[in-house]
Image (spheres, rainbow, N blue to C red):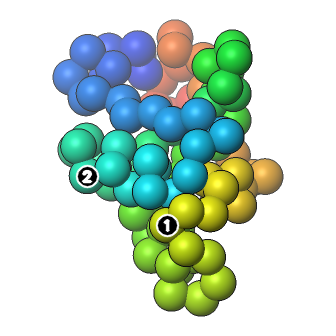
Amino acid sequence: VEIKDYKKRIPLMKVRSNGIIRDAAKAIAEGLLGTVIVVEPDSERFISVVTDGDIRRALMYEYSADSPVSVLISEDSVTANIHMTAEEI
């Protein structure tokens, strides 16, 4: 099974990197995976993934719901080509 086949079954929620944490939390609540894809504002190019856990930790320790979503972005994101299999990743 190729990665592209999963997209058909699971809606991917996304938020722009210039949004706020509240936007990311809302997108996660509306989705099924507990994650949101962070994309560039203009091109919608993938930047990172933010999880509900990332948001909880940010709100507990140092940020508010109105803080920029960019503070949650991890520099260690791993990407895959849509034709790759799960084993190849």
Q: Tell me which numbered mark, 1 or 2, is placed earlier along the sequence.
A: 2
> What is the three-letter code of the residue carrying label 1?
Ala
Kindly identify which residue carries mark 1.
65
Q: Residues within 10 Å of mark 2 (few under 14, many from 20)?
A: some
Apparent side of residue 73 relative to residue 33 in the rendered image (left or right): right
* CA distance for labels 1 and 2: 14 Å
Query: Which residue is located at x 55 percent, y 74 percent?
Result: 64
Percent position of residue 6, x then y: 31, 23
Front one among 79 and 14: 14
Q: Is residue 55 above or below residue 51?
A: below
Apparent side of residue 86 relative to residue 44 in the rendered image (left or right): left
Point out the frontmost of discs 1 and 2. 1
Q: Residues within 10 Å of mark 1 (few under 14, many from 20)?
A: some
Apparent side of residue 53 relative to residue 79 in the rendered image (left or right): left
Query: Which residue is located at x 78 percent, y 52 percent?
Result: 75
Q: Are marks 1 and 2 in contact (CB under 8 Å)?
A: no
Q: Give the structural element (helix, strand or loop) at label 1.
A: loop
Percent position of residue 29, x then y: 25, 52
